Amino acid sequence: MQNQEVYNELVAKFEKVYGEKPTVVSYAPGRIEVLGNHTDYNEGYVFSAAIDKGTFFAASPTADETCELTAGDFMETAKFSINDVKPATEMTWQNYVTGTFNWLFAGKPAEAKHGWKGMFLGNIPLGAGLSSSAALEMCTGLALAKIYGLTVDKTEMAKIGQKAEHTFAGCPCGLLDQASSMYGKEGSLVKSDFRTNTFESVSMGDKVAFMMVKSNAKHALVDGAYASRRAACEDAAKYFASVLKKGSVTHLRDVTMAEWVLYRGGLPETTAKRAVHPIGEDERVIQGAELLAKGDLVGFGALMYDSHESSRNWFENSCEELDVIVDTAKAIPEVYGARLSGGGFGGSCCLLVDPTAADKIAEIITKEYKAKFGDEPTCSLIKPSEGAHLV
Ligand code: GLA
């Protein structure tokens, strides 16, 4: 479904369920991660982009303390009071919304004084690693901020969504997904520095495009694999802080590849393997920025392939399906680079491609994937797009 159709359907369903028009509608896009994997919570760098698919949130205030929230796709409704906002164990989809509401009011939603009626609907494929949950948080945040007359800057809004993930949805994510959704710019990549929380737009030119290839491998970040990677990175940072005799070392952002090579011997083998991934990714993003500035897309693409190798061999957040997509892409001349995108363990690959060869690329990858796994991946061209906004 196109965005306009999603919007129309949402507004029509809202009127049907609540018997009135919404007073506010907001939109927030999903994101692709282009380079810099698992660097955000290590205070490192990432290239990402907001995509041309997202989630809309329609809302109106209520006069009393009640809230009603409807998932516009399967039409389930949750009801609660502003005095009783807590993580749900049933209809857990509501946690992204209620968590955002909770942190919009710094954990004291009763201070909102009155409730709201809300409904959301989107077109980001779920479980694809395109951050449908961050999109839901960001459109919730924008719509509710409008209803309550709150002024929240983009970084603050991203952090509110991240807190909702941590405390209501159970994923100890970094800030990448929410920040990409907030700071996206049409035709541009977002270059993020997660130490200073600065977000720059970098134009891509029109000679290249991104193709997302969604595997059918399950992608879930709340089952412990993501958390265990994050914990390994934090353990490694503590170790490097103790052995490196330089200024402050608080995160893997502060450790160079040369230092990892020299001191890795003091770490358990698995922790050392995990640590080298974000360290290498930071270096690749810095190098990638220089290559992009020179218009060297082949060089930039090669860094994407290196990134995937690092995921596959060191961080071990790839899987057979994603490896087959990347290995197949490597043999196609019109693909400049390919890597897994986002948390990993399934989900999608992001390919940097010559858009004029999109059909051919999709055909080759689909054929190879089907021969190996029996089912077909979904290939779609992605246009870097504008970030979250009120409609
Ligand atoms: C998920 C998380 C992000 C980030 C990526 C990996 O998308 O939500 O915070 O860590 O994985 O780069």
Image (cartoon, helix red, strand yellow):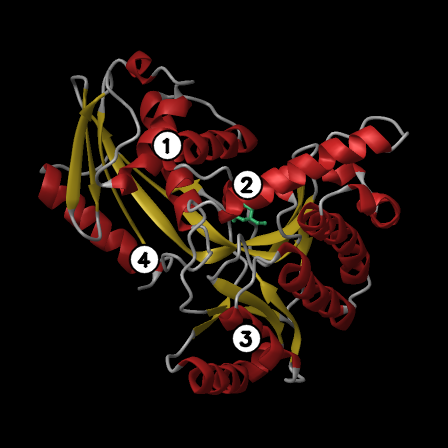
Quadrant of image for the C terminus? top left
Secondary structure type for disc 4: helix
Marker disc for residue 14: none
- The residue tagged 1 is 168
Q: Amino acid at mark 3?
A: Ile
227 left or right of 193 in image: left
Residue 88, x across and y down, in percent: 26, 32
Can you tell me whether the CB of the residue at mark 3 lies under 8 Å from the nearest atom of ligand 1?
A: no
Work out whether residue 61 or residue 35 is closer to the camera in this orientation and state it. 35
SS assignment at label 3: helix
Quarter assignment of residue 27? top left
User: Height in image: 295 above or below 18?
Assistant: below
Depth check, front residue: 247 or 212 = 247
Within-10-Å neighbours for mark 3: few <14, some 14–19, many 20+: many
Q: Do callouts 2 and 1 mark residues in contact (Cβ within 8 Å)?
A: no
Query: Which element type, helix, strand or loop, lies under badge 1?
Result: helix
